[in-house]
Amino acid sequence: MATPVLDKVEAESAASPYITVTFRIRRFNPEISAEAVWEDFQLEIDPKERVLDGLHKIKWDVDGTLTFRRSCAHGICGSDAMRINGKNRLACKTLIKDINPEKPITVEPIKGLTVLKDLVVDMEPFFQAYRDVMPFLITKDTNEPTRERFQTAEDRERFDDTTKCILCAACTSSCPVFWNDGQYFGPAAIVNAHRFIFDSRDEAGEQRLEILNDKDGVWRCRTTFNCTDACPRGIEVTKAIQEVKRALITRRF
Amino acid sequence: MKIHKYDTVIVGAGGAGMRAAIEATKRSRTAVLTKLYPTRSHTGAAQGGMAAALANVEEDNWEWHTFDTVKGGDYLVDQDAAEILAKEAIDSVLDLEKMGLPFNRTPDGTIDQRRFGGHSRNHGEAPVRRSCYAADRTGHMILQTLYQNCVKEGVEFFNEFYVLDQLITEIDGVKHSAGVVAYELATGEIHIFQAKAVIYASGGTGKFFKVTSNAHTLTGDGQAAVYRRGLPLEDMEFFQFHPTGIWRMGILLTEGARGEGGILRNKDGERFMEKYAPVMKDLASRDVVSRSIYTEIREGRGCGPEGDHVYLDLTHLPPEQLDAKLPDITEFARTYLGIEPYTDPIPIQPTAHYAMGGIPTNVEGEVLSDNTTVVPGLYAAGEVACVSVHGANRLGTNSLLDINVFGRRAGIAAAEYSAKADYVELPEDPAEQVVAQVEQLRASTGTERVAEIRRELQECMDANVMVFRTEQTIKTAVEKIAELRERYRNVSIQDKGRRFNTDLLEAIELGNLLDLAEVMAVSALARKESRGGHYREDYPNRDDVNFMRHTMAYREVGDDGTESIRLDYKPVVQTRYQPMERKY
């Protein structure tokens, strides 16, 4: 059992770990002003802490009006997608040390969805697009099996990547097509359609493909790969979209 | 103020709430009120699996599962409920598969199963493969699958609606549920939901601890709402500390890691669990493993310069196995600790994880107002409830099971009740209490800060009522909580607005945590024995003569307005199994 790496980490943490960083946050509260403004906060923080920890320090100790969504704080619930230093990330999965803390850290709401207050956006259009792809297993069984349906490990693996989606909207709100035209389904909805189209148990692939064949469907994708870069779950989003496009052409999936 | 009328209202949209919603929506006009978007719920953080004796990979049966659950709960489990849990587990897993859940598969194409703590073959002979799983994101897949099926069924959600009060109307001396009062986060508006049936499925209360696997939002809102209305809370002294939280952060690393062969080691590299649990070793029940870890730490065999943690060692497992079976938790180690689990062990410590206690219910999910009386129209399921299938210590994989079995039962029972019942008249001025609470907080010019009181509460709870407790530490906690409750009356917030006022929300949540922390400490002080997750160093043995019974805590308000807690006790339901010494 090797331990040297860890001991080094621990030795470092024993010394005073704090550094001073500036959080530059996009503030907006229509109860106060129609304009959004940048506001700077300086704080002492351990660079191994998360951006979310920094936001909490501000909210709890400096300015209680700072508003953002968060819940699990470890990258599973998908509440705290935001634009950090110009890139979509989860605040709870981004460590201060990894985002150049010598310069001000900018934090803005994700783009393409209406900002309601500070970092909180209206998620309803995003979830509507998700619901529109019929994100549930559809089978034509008239007699349900008494036991589980069979699925080979290979068939299960076929759609494994897209089952990881946590609906955080980091992908959809990083997509230039979505910014310009909110009608586009966006990567997250296509990822969730993919999860069912390529599930060997599902029998509504054709229906889902027709939905995505729409003018606001997969063909709007310009393969900029922003979505793949933004996904905090490491899903190969652009690849999934390409697979759906290919399935539309070949009608094989 | 808006008034809504529904047959059935469900509070919370995690696993239990959505499983209930799928049933209730088919049978009655149903609304789900949830303070988070449904897919944000903490069911999604569960990792390792869901127990069911499918016997897909080796011999198993529900009776063995029942026994393990009763033994795991240190015989405080109501055995009739445990039997239902284990029997209905099988259909529960098959239902989820039919709803679309992508379980991992065996080479034959059936649902794969793996080992988990406390689950054994033939009453403790050896570990058994009983946990049905989807990599190490089983909870995520359950939450997603249930949400998908809610979309399919057209379940009506009120997202970011925060339930602050339970409405009770007495009819002929019997408390009936009349509905709930909710606060809409987006607008600050107060809503009254009149309902024939209300189901609480609002989750746990782990945020009164500092090192916890729980989400920031797990603040015991449902427990607090009914407790303040004079209904009891059961077995609140029993809280589970999961053995493997990431050191200092508390982020959960699944027991499935040990199910896959992971080993706990002290600073000498010793596999110390062999000393404490010769048969089950690293897969003993969670209370046993957490105590063993702290024993190692206290006796100077902890790791690191401060000797305050131990290692979870996965380095002997093939990287392909880690990638396939434990991708998320290995990623957590890389992201949050900068450690590569292929080659380096992961520093861990026990983390506050799960409330065994909660709102007492019978096996239909009906809430009790004393040891036997049902509150007509009021239901609870999941971590908020205490049915009691977990007794003094829950087995891993039994909570994802609990939410599915008892979420479904509560959903059906509530909808069947609301189909035949009439609306109960709302109390006069039903929103009075909530309006007063919200206005008082908005107007307060007090000098106390929410964050400071919460910090002190969490530090006090970690120091005094965690894995090891004594009369003295619990008394320290009781006194500190009383002080914090007094200071809370003088708390103020900075955000006075109506729109998305999370400052206000956090203040209300802190009030809930303080009330429940007090119930926990007072219940723990009175239980002068050690059982499951409640370990008293001054009473290290289980005492079946005096304490083989559930604690029932009631809030009492005197004529002069002073609050106190009255403790009563409820017998344990025993059917098949007599208490035995618990060894792993």
Image (cartoon, rainbow, N blue to C red):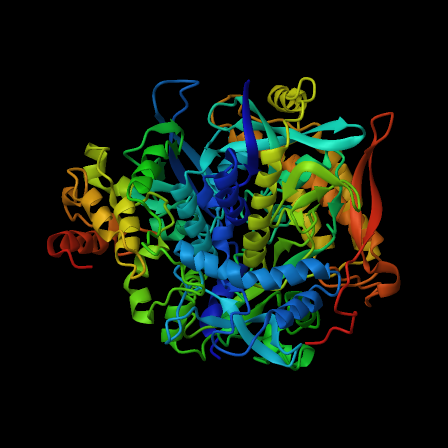
Q: Is residue A194 left or right of residue A67?
A: left
Q: Is residue B492 above or below residue A244?
A: above
Q: Is residue B53 above or below residue B371?
A: below
Which residue occupies the extreme left position in the image? Answer: A249
- Quick check: B510 above or below B95? above
The residue drawn where x is 46% and y is 50% is: B143
Image position, residue B218 (x, y; %): 58, 44
Whether residue B484 can be seen here: yes
Residue at the (24%, 40%) spot, across then down: A185
Q: Tell whether B465 sits left or right of A230.
A: right
Residue B52 position within the rendered picture, expressed as x and y whole percent measured from the top left? 54, 66
Quarter of the C terminus of chain B within the rendering = bottom right
- Percent x, y of residue B155: 45, 38
Q: Quadrant of the N terminus of chain B?
A: top right
The x, y position of residue B432, in whole percent, is 67, 20
Of B516 and B102, nearer the camera is: B102
| In the image, residue B162 above or below residue B203 | above
Q: Give the quadrant of residue B74.
A: bottom right
- Left or right position of B440 against B562: left
Front residue of this view, candidates B130 and A77: B130
The residue at the point 48 percent across, 46 percent down is A45
Which residue is rendered at x = 57% and y = 49% of the image? Answer: B407
Residue B297 is at least partly visible in this image: no
